[in-house]
Amino acid sequence: MELDFGPAVRDFRDEVRDWLADHLVGEFAEHRGVGGPTDGAAWEVRLAWDRELSAGGWLGVGWPEEYGGRGLGLLEEIVFEYEYARVNAPYRATVNALDLLGPMLLAMGSEAQKKRFLPQILAVEELWGQGFSEPGAGSDLASVRTRAERDGDEWVVSGQKVWTSFGIHADWLYVLTRTDPQSARHKGLSLLLVPTDQPGVEIRPIRNLAGQDEFAEVFLSDARTGADMVVGEVGQGWRTAMATLGIERGTTLLPQQLTFEREAEALIDLARERGALDDPMLRRRIVDAWISVRIMRTTNLRTIAELTAGRTPGAQATTAKLYASTRHQQLGQLATELAGPAGQIVGEDYGLDTRQRSFLLSLAETIYGGSSEIQRNIIGEQVLGLPKEPRP
Amino acid sequence: MDLTFTEEQDELRKVVRSFLAKHSDEANVRRLAADPQGHDPVVWGRMAGELGLQGLAVPEEYGGSGFGHVDLGIVFEETGRALLGGPYFATVALAAEALLRCADEQARHGLLPGIASGETVATLALTEDSGRWDEQGVRLTAAHDETGGWRLTGVKTYVPDGHLADLLLVAARTPGGVSLLAVETSDAPGLTRTPLPALDQTRKQARLEFTDTPARLLGPEGAAWPALERTLATAAVLLSAEQVGGAAAALDAAVAYAKIREQYGRPIGSFQGIKHKCADMLMEIESARSAAYGGLWALDAGDETEIAMAAALAQAVCSEAFTKVAADNIQVHGGIGFTWEHPAHLYFKRAKSSEVLLGTPSYHRELLATRLGI
Ligand SMILES: Cc1cc2nc3c(=O)[nH]c(=O)nc-3n(C[C@H](O)[C@H](O)[C@H](O)COP(=O)(O)OP(=O)(O)OC[C@H]3O[C@@H](n4cnc5c(N)ncnc54)[C@H](O)[C@@H]3O)c2cc1C
């Protein structure tokens, strides 16, 4: 199905298509389909690709022009993302800053912060990491213990963060800290922007189960940042952080779903090649995999249509992540099964092919951005209005 | 893009929901379920007269109001939510659609206005003892008689509301293939109708025996199957919308109970075993809703291949979702959910009967697989 957003954006769509056709060539084209929200593969090429996009004016399509964006609407953003995913362009290395920090700064940052950081993000001059999780604070983010204290014009930050995606590449971190030492839970937290290029910040890569160094642990020992580097109000960091997570839960699904569609098609080809379509049990699972990606598509289109019509998205916007992550894992399980013993052999240095990498990385989709269990709590409590879990 | 509802459509939903809250509340659902006819002509008349529901998607030239299938889908979501008894599905989703597809302008002009005005209760008689929904399942025969008319001989069964329909649209085998014929039951010698007592008492079925029963051929002889197939696809999508509505009502009931029922000193909805089950029910429903709405949009967009795929997908997904959610609703209610007095079983039984009404989920998956070329 072709997405048709009407004549208003047709010219824009053609512009996107033409640009991609002209620029997604050579080395970039060889890296089509590389990456994913947590995939550190081919980092340098991807970074160069992001700079190419930046030069073309395609980063921050919806951001205001005064901060280096294009100042276009939600519809254009969606069209761009859709066309981008349609040609299977490499996943953007700057995703953290583009999809999470940027929108957060736009919504809650000070004017000075916007001026200072947003153009740098769009120019791919500064890379960002999200420092929310800690060894003792994962799903229960309100138990964050990293401390920040005021010392004159600066904040002094100490603590440990973990699972920071692309942490070893980060020039800056946005860090959830406790600024009121007496406070408990979500009170007394603040969101700070901290530069990594200083003695108080040590970042060590952590290898993930696919063999990549894509996330990291971060040790902060009297790390320093300016007093003006608080996003939102001091003590209101919980609100700021939740706003980011809301963004994280919402935006990535449309392009992701196109990737899943491609994987479902590849799955059918593989099944045909292997004669698996004659097996009624497998046949059923193959049809179900196809059905799943179709449902994801319609669900996303419903949300987009509601957003562009200025309506509040329905419950499907909240259930979509749980559905997509679960079904994508099933798709990967099936593809791996169909590939048979050959699919169990990897390349030199644990080199994975696209299918293997996507399958292994899919195991993170039910963990990051709020695990499936946390999603179910959110759906149960915030959408269905069920009573909250008792908390100590 | 029009993949969301307009304000008018929201309004339509509201009006239908409040009408049904009054006329298809639990007491009325149970009254009709216990009644062998299962039909309330007064409510039927008001549905047609006040709300125009029978003719909603019938073009104006045939006496309807010419709305689209997205609008009609909204109505079915609501009738499903309210477990409306009576021949609405049979008349609107099956019979009216078959007439609209049948390549017989005269029949459309003659028969659709009665349906739109609420005067005619109609149904489609397709299935036979084999329970098949495909072309091969049609065995009942129609033969020419001496006057140039047609006569039917054979059996149709599991016919929704066949016991009371004024108008039967019958799929029959003629020398040229499968044909569609109309029988007005007020004047049908050789027709015996037997109600079938069913697990789901909220949707009645009947067995129809034809012995040399006169019938009127609709459209060209032997060429009806493509039109019937398309009718079934449309009905499949509308049934999916009905299933989504039923599932949503079952979830509402589960959630309401989980908020007030206490065990271990706290509401059961605060336990993850129940909370997560309810969250999964919602996820199933929203996915099913995407499937059903995808079908409705495809119907209004009119691309035949897309309609066939979307319909099969919707039936496979929505049938299973409704059954699962209706069963989970019983589970959330515990012992009370297992009683005759509690409405949970009414939804569960409607789910099970809907699951096979137009072909099983496996059948629809197979249709889909074939369309996908796998
Ligand atoms: C690939 C990847 C990239 C990531 N990138 C980042 C990043 O860039 N920045 C960042 O800050 N964080 C990042 N994270 C961290 C991610 O947000 C956390 O892993 C996630 O929130 C879960 O926390 P945890 O790992 O501590 O698991 P835990 O919270 O310890 O959970 C363990 C298990 O217990 C379950 N559980 C926990 N609480 C409950 C509850 N109340 N009810 C029911 N079950 C519960 C969980 O669902 C899970 O199954 C990333 C994680 C991954 C896997």
Image (cartoon, coloured by chain):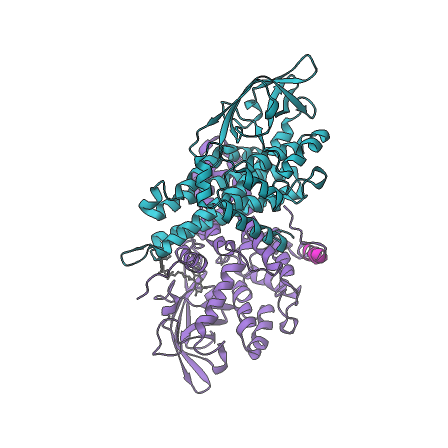
Image quadrant occupied by the N terminus of chain A: top right
- Count of numbered marks: 0
Main secondary structure along the magenta-highlighted residues: helix
Magenta-highlighted residues: A8-19
Q: Residue A176 is drawn in which quadrant?
A: bottom left
Image quadrant occupied by the C terminus of chain A: bottom left
Q: Residue at the location (39% across, 46% down)? A: B329
Residue A286 x %, y %: 49, 38
Tell whether position A13 is magenta.
Answer: yes
Asked if B370 appears above or below A158 in the picture, the reply is: above
Residue B130 x %, y %: 49, 23
Q: Nearer the viewer, residue B367 or B262?
A: B262
Q: Residue at the location (34% across, 52% down)? A: B273
Asked whether the viewer can see residue B307, the reply is yes
Q: Nearer the viewer, residue A297 or B115?
A: B115
Which chain is drawn using cyan? Answer: B
Which residue is at the far top?
Answer: B146
Left or right for A279, reference B6? left
Chain A: give its colour.
purple
Instruction: Name the quadrant where ligand 1 sits.
Output: bottom left
Residue B210 x %, y %: 56, 19
Q: Nearer the viewer, residue B257 or A220?
A: B257
Asked whether the viewer can see residue A354, the reply is no
Residue A201 x %, y %: 42, 74
Q: Residue B94 is drawn in which quadrant?
A: top right
